[in-house]
């Protein structure tokens, strides 16, 4: 059986060669399709010419996929032809001796085993293993195979033009978009940042900072302002003792000056300018301090986002603004520090005296009623509150859920938490106690 053995060796060699070619195509297909444009762009900027070629191929992916499919299908057909009954000369006599079957049935069994053997070789070594390798580092694999892939595209050009033209015609009939959408969304950036945090490339504080920056476009400025009821202001007829008491009790850097009430704002005064006059007994009332009153007050509507408010601060070169509603009433004030604080850290990480969210123990939090729902979502890991666009604070959430002015001990069950009103001040919720009903399952680290 020398000729038969030689034939089998030759066919096995051809199968190994076809597997190697299939490995190349599998790695090329997965790596070029999975390679991220952002990483390739960075590699290109560092001088990697192959990365530039990969980006070009991704822009015209039709030629690439046509070449891969032509090559893959051709290899599959050749593999079937070459591998047909390749093990029969060895298996047929063994099957006859072991199972005492006829020669015809033994040949059928041998053919089936040969088919399973060859198919298994292609599945494991020509498909599964190379694809998993390419997925592990798609950018590195893509730049490694791009040159031979371009050569293959050149060789198969006639077939590519033929098949790609038919595919393009079908896409046009059904009005299917053919170009790859390379637009990067917030979700894409968040996914990259989350991946970096999981791998340890981005620290927890950096991760929080990036998320806070992107929230500036989605959060209203009213979510970080000092609310109307908490604003300390002077009236023009206010006496010296009252001014001294407010300055000593509320050591703010700036105070609003109003004619009669909070809605009749004239301007503001810096503490550093009014304090010397008070100490020298030069101030009996505020009528005689017009020279130190800044009337160029920055007024902002409550319909601005934090990002838009930041732009207004930069344009006006101011760090202090009053927020008005559509009726021209003062609803709060915001400072540049409030914006910076929102970017640099969540409310829960502020100084103890300024905390709006205080962790009381495992699964329990004490929360001020004026705390922004965005801050509460972060701490409690809640994705979304119901109809959250209709309110800004956690007190607003309680009013929405209860459909009434909440009273002490009023409770709301939401997600895995119980929200209970523990203190009410003039019909306004002062504090809430939030309790986690059941602990979430934690993932084990392996």
Image (cartoon, rainbow, N blue to C red):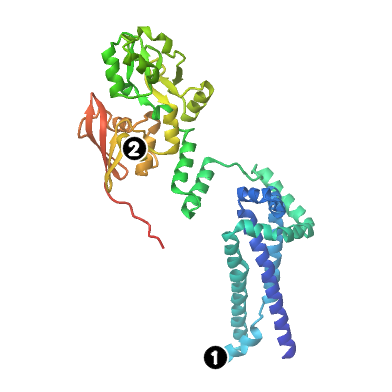
Circle on res. 231: none
| Quadrant of res 14 | bottom right
Q: Residue at x 34, y 31 (%)?
A: 393
Question: What residue is disc 1 on?
Answer: 98
User: How packed is label 2: few (under 14 Cα within 10 Å), some, or many (20 or more)?
Assistant: few
Where is the C terminus found, in terms of image quarters?
bottom left
Taking the view exactly as shown, the residue that stands out farthest to the front is 280
Q: Position of residue 111 (x, y in %)?
A: 62, 79
Residue 277 in the image, given as x and y percentages of width and height: 35, 14
Vertical comparison of 376 with 241: above or below: below
Which numbered dot is residue 351?
A: 2
- Of the pair 16 and 234, the residue shown nearer to us: 234
Q: Position of residue 332 (x, y in %)?
A: 37, 22
Q: Disc 2 or 1, which lies upstream in sequence?
A: 1
- In the rendered view, tell whether residue 119 sits above or below residue 289: below
In the image: residue 256, left or right of residue 311: left
């Amino acid at each position: 059986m020398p000729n038969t053995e030689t034939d089998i060796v030759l066919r096995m060699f051809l199968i190994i060669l076809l597997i190697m070619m299939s490995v190349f195509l599998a790695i090329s297909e997965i790596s070029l399709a999975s390679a991220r444009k952002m990483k390739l762009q960075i590699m290109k900027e560092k001088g990697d010419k192959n990365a530039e070629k990969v980006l070009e191929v991704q822009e015209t992916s039709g030629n690439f996929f046509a070449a891969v499919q032509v090559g893959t299908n051709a290899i599959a057909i050749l593999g079937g032809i070459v591998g047909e009954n390749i093990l029969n000369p060895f298996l047929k006599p063994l099957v006859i001796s072991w199972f005492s079957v006829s020669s015809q049935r033994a040949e059928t069994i041998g053919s089936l085993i040969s088919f399973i053997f060859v198919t298994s070789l292609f599945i494991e070594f020509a498909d599964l293993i190379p694809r998993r390798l390419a997925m592990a580092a798609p950018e590195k694999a893509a730049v490694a195979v791009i040159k031979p892939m371009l050569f293959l595209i050149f060789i198969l050009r006639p077939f590519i033009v033929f098949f790609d033209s038919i595919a393009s015609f079908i896409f046009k009939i059904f009005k299917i978009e053919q170009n790859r959408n390379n637009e990067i969304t917030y979700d894409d950036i968040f996914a990259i940042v989350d991946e970096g945090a999981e791998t340890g490339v981005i620290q927890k504080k950096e991760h929080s900072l990036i998320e806070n920056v992107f929230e500036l476009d989605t959060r209203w400025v009213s979510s970080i302002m000092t609310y109307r009821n908490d604003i300390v202001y002077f009236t023009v007829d206010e006496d010296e003792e009252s001014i001294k008491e407010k300055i000593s009790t509320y050591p703010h850097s700036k105070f609003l000056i109003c004619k009669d009430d909070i809605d009749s704002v004239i301007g503001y005064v810096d503490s550093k300018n009014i304090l010397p006059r008070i100490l020298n007994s030069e101030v009996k009332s505020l009528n005689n301090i017009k020279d130190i009153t800044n009337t160029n007050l920055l007024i902002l509507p409550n319909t601005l986002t934090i990002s838009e408010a930041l732009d207004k601060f930069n344009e006006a070169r101011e760090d202090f603004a009053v927020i008005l509603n559509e009726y021209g009433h003062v609803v709060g004030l915001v400072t540049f520090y409030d914006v910076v604080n929102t970017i640099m850290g969540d409310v829960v990480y502020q100084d103890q005296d300024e905390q709006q969210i205080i962790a009381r123990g495992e699964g329990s939090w004490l929360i001020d009623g004026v705390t922004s729902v965005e801050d509460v979502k972060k701490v409690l890991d809640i994705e979304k509150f119901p109809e959250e666009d209709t309110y800004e604070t956690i007190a607003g959430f309680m009013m929405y859920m209860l459909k009434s002015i909440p009273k002490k001990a009023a409770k709301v069950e939401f997600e895995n938490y119980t929200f209970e009103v523990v203190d009410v001040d003039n019909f306004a919720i002062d504090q809430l106690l939030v309790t986690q009903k059941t602990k979430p399952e934690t993932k084990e680290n392996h």
